[in-house]
Structures are given as structure tokens and as C-alpha cells.
Amino acid sequence: PAIGRIVDKVAAVFVPTVMIVAVLTFLAWINFGPAADTTAYAVVTAMTVLIIACPCALGLATPMSIMIGVGKAAEFGALIRNGDALQQVGKLDVIVLDKTGTVTEGKPSVTEVSAAGDWRRDDVLRLAACLEKVSEHPLAEAIVAAAEDGNLALPAAEKFNAIAGHGAEAHVDGRKVLLGSRKLMADHNIDISDLDDAARQAMTRAQTPVYVAVENAVAGLISIADAIKPDSREAIQRLQRAGITVALLTGDNQATADAVADEIGIKEVFAEVLPEDKAEKIASLQQAGHLVGMVGDGINDAPALARADVGFAIGTGTDVAIESADITLRRGSVQGVVDVVVVSWATVRNIKQNLFGAFIYNTLGIPIAAGVLFPFVGILLNPMIAGAAMAMSSVTVVSNANRLRFLKQGATP
């Protein structure tokens, strides 16, 4: 990670500096040491400087903490792909959550079918299921499942066309069927006012209204609910207590998104965002000066996951999302995001402690090894003691890094 690269730069200066100090120590003792045996004093002090300044602790400070931190995150159910991600997580000030499959269970179900005009509910559901049978959208699975549960015959749809972010169209029984959002209906100049009450009721219950139109006339409305994960609200509260702003990002309509956000305690909502615009939304937050984390699970989340400073993929999501992210949450819960934040803060703090200890050790040890106390108290550091001190500095760093093993899951950041 970045903090490790800083140590590499310091070591690149530190090592030649110590060599120069050792040479200067040798020359000082040769020229100004006790007349009895200047050469012996010069050799012993120069060697002691080299021994005590061996930068083992400096080199161990970062990788030991990172190794244990990454292992601890894995124990908590988060697989971290690189050390940079572990360090960056602790700096995030905004985390954006996708709705479906991240905050919610990702297992939507049909709760209500409302018919318009002379249409029957079963006919509306049957036409919608025929069209959605060839779709890969999560809502499509819910509609097809509801039709199959009702033992409805589902003839094959023809000329299927998915309209990204809005819905789909196809021909069923020789008639053109259009299925999707309010905006899709508006784009085709279809009057849906007869279903306004049904749509309003669905949205206030945090359900998604899906309109069905046949031959450019509204036929009905299907209300689909996706249960919120039991631990989503608690996880979001933990993030907010840590000073992190949490936002909800979804392609769903504003009213449904607001209802979900209210239920889980999120104030910042980005609704009706098309799949191709999700990455742009992340970029706009970054341009505003934020360090942004993105949590998602779907194919259309992949660009946003890659664009974010740290991408979190829900482990139960698609392979594309997992491949695009820096961190994979195996539990499929937002709680995993908070756990990684806790591990990140603890790991970076541990690294800083290790580096501080290593620098203090060398700052104090090198002058003593060079014989700075000899003119005052007549004491020189024995090379064997210097070797033991050097080894103990490494033991101290390793022992401090191992304190990360005592980190408990569910701790507040």
C-alpha cells in the first residue's frame, strides 16, 4: 500500500545514511579516541552502529500489519485483493449503496396485480410473464414465478427487445406488449392515469410499480416487493456513527427509493439512475472532493465499482461485479463494509505504531552505538547487546502487529 511505499523511500535514504554515519564514527574515533587503542575503539563503534541500525523492524512494520489485517478481514468475510484497498477504506467519507441485492434481499416477489379497463388480472400477469420469460432482470424472475404459481400458460414471446433502465418490449399472441417504468409509458404516449392510485400505494410501501401496455394502451400494473435485509439498517447506522455519509443509488423510481431510504435511515438518495450513468454519479462525487466507496452486486454496477476509490462486491452477486471490485463481501451483507472499515483503521493505526517504534529505536540507538555517552560516563555499547536490541526491535514490531488478531467482529469504528 501507499504507506509501505513511503517506508521504501525512507529506507532508500536511511541505509546509505547509516553507512555514512558508521564511516564518520570510525574516523572520529581514529582521530579523537583514547590514545591507547584508537583502532579497536573505531572498529567496535562503527560495527555497533551498523548492527543496531539494521532496518529489520522498519522493513517488517508494514507487511506484518497488512498480512494480519487482510487475514482478519477474511475471517470477517471480506476478501481484499490488494493492500491499497485496505488502506483506502479507512479514508472513505462517502459510501454509495446499490439498492437491489445490496440493501435488499435481491429476491423480489409480486405482491399485487392491478388491471385497467376490461383487462383481467390473470391476463395482465400472463402477458407480462411471457415477455419477461426471456429477460435476465431480477424483477422478471418475480413476474415469471408469480405466473407459474398461478398455472398460467406462457406462450413464447417474439421480437423481444430490452430497453436498458426502463423495461422491455415484445410481441405476444401477435400483439405488441410493452412492460416497464412510468417513463417508458410516457415515452410511448400511453395514458396511465387510471392506475395512479395503485402505483402510489405501491411506492409508499417501498414496492416497485411495473406497467403493462398492450398495443399502446395501458393494461395493468404489477407491484413488486423486495424485502430489505434484516441487518441493513444497523450496518448503515454503524457507518454513520463512524462519520461516513451513506447514499442509496438505484434505477428505481424516486418515490420507491425514498420509501426504502426512510426505512433504513439514509438521507442521500440517487434514484432513476440508468445503468450507464452509475459510474458518472460516482465520478461526480469524486470531483466534489469525496473519497467514495461503492457497494453493488449486479452487472450494471461493475463500471461504478471500478470507478470508485474502493469497490465492494456482494459475494452473492455476479462474477463481473466481483471481478470489478477491490473487496468481495462473502456474507452478502452491508455489515461486511463496516467490518472492513474497522479492520482498515486498526491496521493503519498499527502500522503507524510500528513505524514510530522503529524510528524511535534507531534515533536513540545509533548515537549511543556511535559512543556519544563515552565522553560523559565512559560507557560504550557492546556489539552483542546491540545485536540483541536489534532483534528485540523486530520482535516488538511483530508482537504489536499480532495484536490485530484480537480485533472483534462487529466492533464500532
Image (cartoon, rainbow, N blue to C red):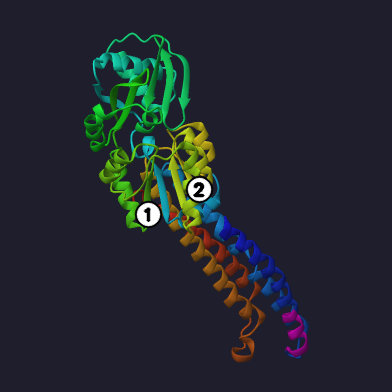
Query: Can see residue 71?
Result: no
Name the residue located 29 percent from the left edge and 40 percent from the top edge. 255
Can you say whether 68 is above or below 396 in the image?
Answer: above
Kind of residue at badge 1: Thr
Q: First in sequence, mark 1 or 2: give its number.
A: 1
Query: Which is the main secondary structure of the residues drawn in magenta?
Result: helix
Please say whether residue 352 is one of the residues in the magenta stretch. Answer: no
Can you say whether 143 is above or below 385 in the image?
Answer: above
Report whether 260 appears left or right of 96: left
User: Circle 2 is placed at which residue position?
Assistant: 308
Name the residue located 59 percent from the left edge and 89 percent from the top edge. 377
Q: Secondary structure at mark 2?
A: loop
The number of numbered badges drawn on the structure is 2
Q: Quadrant of residue 383?
A: bottom right
Mark 1 and mark 2: Cα distance apart in space: 15 Å
Between 344 and 226, the one lying in front of the other is 226
Q: Which residues are magenta?
A: 24-33
Q: Quadrant of residue 217?
A: top left
Name the residue located 53 percent from the left edge and 39 percent from the top edge. 324
Q: Which mark is residue 245?
A: 1
Kind of residue at badge 2: Ala
